[in-house]
Amino acid sequence: LNETYGAVPVLVMFQLFLSGIMSVNGKKVLHMDRNSYYGGDSASITPLEDLYKRFKLPGCPPETMGRGRDWNVDLIPKFLMANGQLVKMLLYTEVTRYLDFKVTEGSFVYKGGKIYKVPSTEAEALASSLMGLFEKRRFRKFLVYVANFDENDPRTFEGVDPKKTTMRDVYKKFDLGQDVIDFTGHALALYRTDDYLDQPCQETINRIKLYSESLARYGKSPYLYPLYGLGELPQGFARLSAIYGGTYMLNKPIQEIVIENGKVVGVKSEGEIARCKQLICDPSYVPDRVTKVGLVIRVICILSHPIKNTNDANSCQIIIPQNQVNRKSDIYVCMISSAHNVAAQGKYIAIASTTLETNDPEKEIKPALDLLEPIEQKFVSISELFAPTDMGTESQIFISRTYDATTHFETTCDDIKDIYKRMMGSEFDFEEMKRKKNDIYGEEEQQ
Amino acid sequence: MALRELKVCLLGDTGVGKSSIVWRFVEDSFDPNINPTIGASFMTKTVQYQNELHKFLIWDTAGQERFRALAPMYYRGSAAAIIVYDITKEETFSTLKNWVKELRQHGPPNIVVAIAGNKCDLNDVREVMEKDAKDYADSIHAVFVETSAKNAININELFIEISRRIPSTDTNPPSSSKGFKLRRQPSVTKPRCC
């Protein structure tokens, strides 16, 4: 440890990801993690026994759960948008080499106590009972408008000012009803609340474009999921960083972050100090430099059956828009199964989550759990969400935000880009992430 | 002729010559000053074995063995593992057992294990007896050879022996249960600013 490191990232995928890019860009990176596994909150817990321990459940998993090692259970439910920023980052860094993906089989939306498939083709849209015939026509016109919309070409605006016109007014322009608005804002633009309605429409239109472009990539749904769980992502980035000289230490308790004159100079662990110029970490390592921004409840449910009315999908997302259950924020369900090598044969893992609004979390999440019954085993957690109060300008400590309740990685990627900019003093550039040297030897990869 | 892709992962302490063995096998060269921390991500070589082509996809540790920080991903889907020790350093042989344990814990159940006692060109400073290593390898049903990456001794033989031990029937899962690799989209869409 007697070397000075450019940056010491501690924990979480995102730190791993940043350590990947930093290493590619010639920064000397030391990675320390208090856990015995990579990825912190974005890890997938294996074997199943460890999940029982983590949630302090008495006893061992019953025999019906199969082999403990067949399980890789995510703590944070998320999918990747097929055309989203994380996929782009994986492609540029070629971390894709280490990963295998499957397309999520369907996306569903809750309306009036039932779930409906979010149409993924025009034919499906026409056949869907989600909306009436006239609404379908108006909705189609709206989708065509969004598809043609190009923020750099005012001719595609049709009288809308992307930076001024609110989304509420755009819906009005296309005469869309409340149900269609709910569906569009929450199942396509993936907003968790209705705050976006009174914001300029550009962001919403871009989100709907991202949804439809992602959907166009593989067909069934816009979402991808890696085999063996989300924990594969931080592992892949760790490998990238290691190939570029990053040093990795797991099981490293962090005793102290050493500050001199308001600036970080090192990290103390097991009596030794690793000296560094910059530090990246998650909020749990620096409780005095973050502030609480919310609470999220997550319920991991093990099922022995696919979710009802999903056409036996082996993976899916269900969105319960807030309006439908008299809430301010949506409830999400992400479901994956043995088809993704994350559960024993015939088992399904559904994770229900939402941002808490009352003092009765179990009641808030109930509409989602009702869709999943019978539930074989539940693992309930309530997590505080933190955001940094110290942006690192003086201290050179760069703190990530806690994973939020969204079911994709787009906000996480925004955070990565933001930290990159603050650390490096220049805008994040995908080109910078390309590997700088040939690191494949032997025959050409035939893939 | 059928082509089978076989992932092989390397294990063993830092400095025993893991990368050098693969370097010799893949490029037939030897660099005494090979950079210890910066590894190659993948090294590949195809060899014929009976009426099959075996394409070895060899994963190097990229230095992550130094603090025992190899991720489960590293072992995932491996057909074989080569555990290397240095015949001139007793302690690299004693830690071999830890690597075997690690592999049993994280590796696939039917993985072929090969033990390579490297640097056998340095016989006069030997600390590990060939017989001791051979007995140990036999006790865990592992392939065993003494190698020299420097002098190209037993390197090809090591891989031939691995090929021989790989079950001949393809036990790969049917393609429906496999995932796919992400690829760049053929650029039909015009570039967008983000």
Image: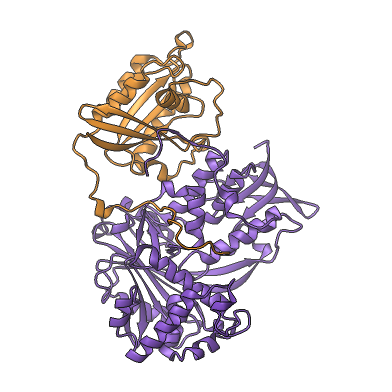
Chain colours: A purple, B orange
Residue sitting nearer the eye, A118 or A51: A118
- Classify A272 as above or below A35: above
Residue A35 image point, x, y percent: 51, 50
Residue A148 image point, x, y percent: 48, 75
Q: Which of the 4 image quadrants contains residue A306? A: bottom left
Farthest left residue in view: B169
- Classify A245 as above or below A312: above
Q: Which of the 4 image quadrants contains residue B72? A: top left
Q: Quadrant of the N terminus of chain A?
A: top right
- Classify A20 as above or below A339: above
Residue A308 visible to an observer of this rendering: yes
Q: Which of the 4 image quadrants contains residue B110? A: top left
Residue A108 image point, x, y percent: 35, 76
Left or right placement of residue A371 versus residue A241 in this view: left
Residue B185 image point, x, y percent: 43, 57
Q: Residue at x 44, y 10 (%)?
A: B123
Left or right placement of residue B112 versus residue A212 in this view: left
Q: Quadrant of the C terminus of chain A?
A: top left
Residue sitting nearer the eye, A85 or B61: A85
- Classify B39 as above or below A362: above
Residue A378 visible to an observer of this rendering: no
Residue sitting nearer the eye, A5 or A194: A194
Farthest right residue in view: A261
Farthest front residue in view: A155
Q: Residue at x 45, y 26 (%)?
A: B23
